[in-house]
């Protein structure tokens, strides 16, 4: 009996269990009555009380709202037709089309004119731009001379000259004091082709604006997909997309007509 107890004690208190002690820990020494050898125990091992792992507390973020709660707090439309204001959508599309027409006429003029030059954007301080008509007086002197008077803003003479030279109008302004003089050049085939390409670029820019109107309204429609019929929402979305396609067709028609004038008008 004594031999079996001695064997059990030897296994339980074998030195291999305590060979790797953490640094700088207190140790305790006592004599094992079973094997009559001093045993060193770590203070950490003397604590035999089992501790259950601490449970993580669920943190509640007060003030935060789920997506559904936010939608419930908004004014929920009574029907699908009230989600998007189609009158406002038509107004935005009409503005894009009108702006395209105005830019097409002013920026692709075959000959430099008082109106086209007055609307040129000039780079000023801090990266801002302003139309030439707000800082200069533009007039035409027969038969083929344009006078730009910058006496009220002489600090922008260099900026205006630089802008005119890169305006795709084949212009070479001459500086005289606070004025710039431009001789209207003879229109060449090469110049007409450049204007035609410029018109295509303007049309692409306004098609991007049409797409922006489409995407913003489609995003509003999809926000209510959990509250209305998917089929009804899809019909409303298609209505917005079809309006956008109609504007793009109108842009293409205006572009085609303008390019025909630029390339065929001799």
Image: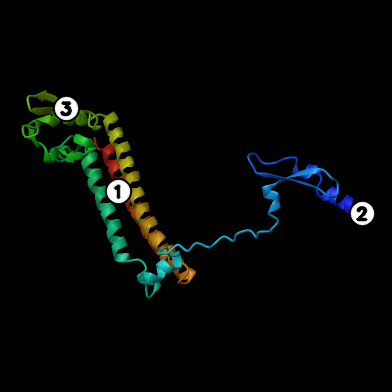
Residue 151, percent from left and from top: 6, 32
Q: Residue at x 32, y 37 (%)?
A: 197
Disc 2 from disc 3: Cα separation: 110 Å
Crowd band around label 1 with a 10 angstrom C-alpha radius: few (<14), some (14–19), many (20+): some
The answer to which quarter of the image holds residue 84 is bottom left
Q: Residue at x 34, y 56 (%)?
A: 213
Q: Is residue 161 visible?
A: yes
Disc 2 from disc 1: Cα separation: 110 Å
Residue 116, percent from left and from top: 18, 39
- Cβ–Cβ under 8 Å for marks 2 and 3: no
Mark linked to residue 2: 2
Q: Nearer the viewer, residue 246 or 93?
A: 93
Q: Is residue 231 left or right of residue 37?
A: left
Q: Residue at x 27, y 57 (%)?
A: 94
Indicate the secondary structure of the residue bearing disc 3.
Answer: helix
Residue 221, percent from left and from top: 41, 64
Earlier-in-chain disc, 2 versus 1 = 2
Q: Is residue 61 left or right of residue 258?
A: right
Q: Is residue 58 left or right of residue 258?
A: right
Earlier-in-chain disc, 3 versus 1 = 3
Residue picked out by circle 1: 254
User: Can you say which quadrant of the picture contains the N terminus?
Assistant: bottom right
The answer to which quarter of the image holds residue 38 is top right
Can you tell which of label 3 and label 1 is closer to the viewer? 3
């Amino acid at each position: 009996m004594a031999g079996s107890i001695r064997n059990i004690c030897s296994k339980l208190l074998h030195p291999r269990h305590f060979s790797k002690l953490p640094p700088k820990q207190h140790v305790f020494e006592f004599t094992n009555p079973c094997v009559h050898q001093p045993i060193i125990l770590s203070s950490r091992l003397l604590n035999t009380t089992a501790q259950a792992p601490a449970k993580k507390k669920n943190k509640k973020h007060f003030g935060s709202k789920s997506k559904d709660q936010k939608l419930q707090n908004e004014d929920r439309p009574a029907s699908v037709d009230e989600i998007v204001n189609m009158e406002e959508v038509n107004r935005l599309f009409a503005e894009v089309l009108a702006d395209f027409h105005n830019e097409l006429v002013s920026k692709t003029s075959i000959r430099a004119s008082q109106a086209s030059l007055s609307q040129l954007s000039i780079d000023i301080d801090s990266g801002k731009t302003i139309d030439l008509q707000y800082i200069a007086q533009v007039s035409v002197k027969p038969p083929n001379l344009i006078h730009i008077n910058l006496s009220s803003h002489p600090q922008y003479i260099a900026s205006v000259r630089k802008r005119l030279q890169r305006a795709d109008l084949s212009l070479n302004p001459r500086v005289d004091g606070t004025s710039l003089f431009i001789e209207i050049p003879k229109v060449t085939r090469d110049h007409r082709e450049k204007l035609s390409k410029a018109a295509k670029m303007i049309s692409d820019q306004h098609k991007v604006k049409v797409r922006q109107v489409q995407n913003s309204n489609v995003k509003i429609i999809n926000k209510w997909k959990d509250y209305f019929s998917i089929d009804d929402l899809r019909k409303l979305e298609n209505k917005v997309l079809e309006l956008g396609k109609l504007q793009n067709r109108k842009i293409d028609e205006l572009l085609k007509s303008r390019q025909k004038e630029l390339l065929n008008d001799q």
